[in-house]
Each structure stands twice: as structure tokens, then as C-alpha cells.
Amino acid sequence: MEKLFSVPLKGGTITDVYTCSPDDVERTISSYPSSLSVFDDNTAKAYGKSIDSMSLILPHGEEHKNWASIDSILAKAIESGLARDSVFFGIGGGVILDMTAFAASIYMRGARCVLVPTTLLSAVDATLGGKTGIDYGGAKNTVGTFFPSESVLICTELLKTLPESEYRSGLGEVLKHALLSENAELWNFLLDNKDKVLSRDGNTVSEMIRLSLEVKISYITRDPEEKKGIRSALNLGHTFGHALESLYDYGISHGEGVAWGVVRALEAGEAMGITSHSLSSSASELFRLYGFDEGFRIPEDLFGRYFKAIGKDKKKKSGEVRFVLLEGQGRPVLKPIDEDLVRRIVTKRA
Ligand code: GLY
């Protein structure tokens, strides 16, 4: 196991991030006398896991990110005799990680938690920063806590077997981090290593994850509970992107939606005189290079539904949706955008 980072977060908690092999994960789990490992049925299969007294397998999918799953985790924890110093292992994508950490955060007022991401998206996003939770009341992540895990174990080997669409979804977030970075390291790395990134070369993927997490860390350590308007920048592309995902009933992956949304945010910034044309066009070029359909536009007759979906965005403050825009690479600002400009940016030109 190699330690990549020690990240200081909420209330003096430190999250240690390691790269490791699946055997290291097994060894780590066995090293704790009392633990519960939570999988979904897909990851359990990939992991060759069957139900035993120390593990729980939940059905996969966003539709199971709910109280019923939290109830199952807590019931299993009680049944297995877990105490406050026992460890909850979340092994899976973002849904499993968010729910396991949420259950750990409320079990006996806070047990221990270790996260093992099995998707690129969760490796570069859900693992770090302590956001936990479930979907409730028809909206995503409406109930939850901030509860940073004590460690994160990233096995790049597991990412080799991800379906292509799942891997690409993670790349959307990685490219977003390149734009949010205050330096050019990740962006240049992506430009120089496209073929190795796409063929999932082990060392290249590890380095890409390290550089990507470095960007996330710089935002979450400055604003651990998203109270200062700094961490919200990580939502670059999400307001445009979530609404697109919702418009197409989640037939578009999260990362594809974010990638599309980042390019729209840059175009909007350019139209508002905030973003330079050169940043906007070189970012579009980067997304194109990685095969994202960044030029896609929605049909004009769907705009009403699209704009309504934007209104549901959770970054709505005092009745106003604020978008993350970029004054430059690594220089985010939050601003409202008027409906006419959104229409111009997202719809098919006649
Ligand atoms: N996923 C965005 C954040 O962690 O704040």
C-alpha cells in the first residue's frame, strides 16, 4: 500500500488515502476484529463476495439510495454486534460509499468508516470530503451528514474491469478537475497521456487519480462543509449537467452530463464577459479529445422542461440558481445566468 495523502478535514479528522491491491483491502478488513463490509450486488460479484456475518450486499442503483438501505446497514450492524469502535467498510461506487458513510455517521453517534471506491467516479469524488447521504423527497442527496472517512483505499486494478461508459463517466469529473486546478499539471497530463488514460494503463490511471484528488483536496480543505462558497466550485458543470441528466431520465451518465455542463458553463462565461475565448475553446478541445459530445444541443421544444430541471438545482440560494463559472483556469465564481442566455447556450441553433 502506498499512502498518497493525509487530508485534514472537519473537526480535526484526517483521511489517509492509499493506493493498493485487492489483497491489501482483504488484509485491511481482516486486521479489524469487528467490521461490516457493505457492497452492492454488482461489486460483490466482481469481488467474488458472498454474504457472511461480516458483509452486507445491497441492490445496486441510485433508486436504492434510500432509508430502506440505511435501515438494512444499521440492522446488520446491530445483528453483528458492532460497537462504536467497529469499522464500516463501504466497497463500491458513489451510492454505496455515501450510504455506508451515512450509516457509520449515525450508528451509535458515529462509528469508524473506511471507503474502497470501485469506480473512477467515486475514486476521484465520493471518497473524499465527507459528504454522506441518501436521496429523499424526490431529490438527490437531500438527507445526510458531513463525516469524513478515516481512510480511503483505491485499487486501480479494479478499475480495469469497469464498463466503458462507467469509466468515461469518471473521466468527465477528472477533466472538470483539470479546469478547476490552479496549475496546468493535470491538464497537461491529460493532453500528454490520452492513449494510456483510455487504455487504463495502471500507473497512468494512478497518477491521474492522484492529480485529480490533489485538486479536490485544495477545495475541500479550504471549505470542508461548503459554507464559504469555495467548495461549491466543485459543482462546475453540474447545474447544466444535472438538468440534462434529468431531461433524458438519467440515460446520460453523470460524468457525460458534467462534461457537457462544463463546456456550457464556459460558453456562458464567455458570453457574459467572464471567461476568455481561449480558455473556453481549449477546454472544448480537451473534452473533444476524450470523445465527449461537447457540442450536443437540446431541441428547442424541450427547453421548458430543461429549464424547470435547472430550477431544482440544490445550489439554489434565496430563490436564485447560481452557476459555477470560470474567470480563468482555477478561478471559479458563482453567478446567476438569465433564462435567455441559458436557452441560447443549450439549445440547437436553427
Ligand atoms: N462532489 C462535490 C463535493 O464533494 O463537494
Image (tube, helix red, strand yellow):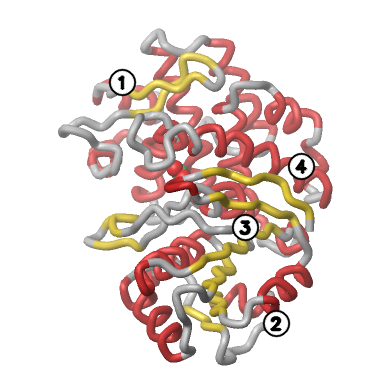
The mark closer to the camera, 4 or 2, is 4
- Left or right: 34 with respect to 132? right
Alpha-carbon distance for marks 1 and 4?
A: 38 Å
- Residues 131 and 202: in front is 131
Residue at 56% x, 91% y is: 53
Alpha-carbon distance for marks 4 and 2?
A: 27 Å
Residue at 60% x, 38% y is: 292
Residue at 72% x, 64% y is: 158
Q: Residue 159 shows which numbered tag? A: none
Alpha-carbon distance for marks 2 and 1?
A: 50 Å
Amino acid tagged 4: Glu
Residue 250 place in picture, x, y as percent: 42, 55
Q: Residue 207 shows which numbered tag? A: 4
Mark found first going from the N terminus, 1 or 4: 4
Please tell me whether residue 310 is drawn above or below residue 189 in the rendered image: below
| Element carrying mark 3 | strand
Residue at 57% x, 54% y is: 122
Please tell me whether residue 250 is drawn above or below residue 27 in the rendered image: above
On the image, numbered disc 2 is attached to which residue?
48
- Residues 169 and 327: in front is 327
Please state the quadrant of the image where ligand 1 appears.
Answer: top left
Few, some or many C-alpha atoms within 10 Å of disc 2 (few <14, some 14-19, many ≥20)? few
Marks 3 and 2: CB-CB under 8 Å? Answer: no
Residue 59 place in picture, x, y as percent: 47, 78
On the image, numbered disc 3 is attached to which residue?
152
Mark found first going from the N terminus, 4 or 2: 2
On the image, numbered disc 1 is attached to which residue?
341
Alpha-carbon distance for marks 4 and 3?
A: 16 Å
Amino acid tagged 3: Val
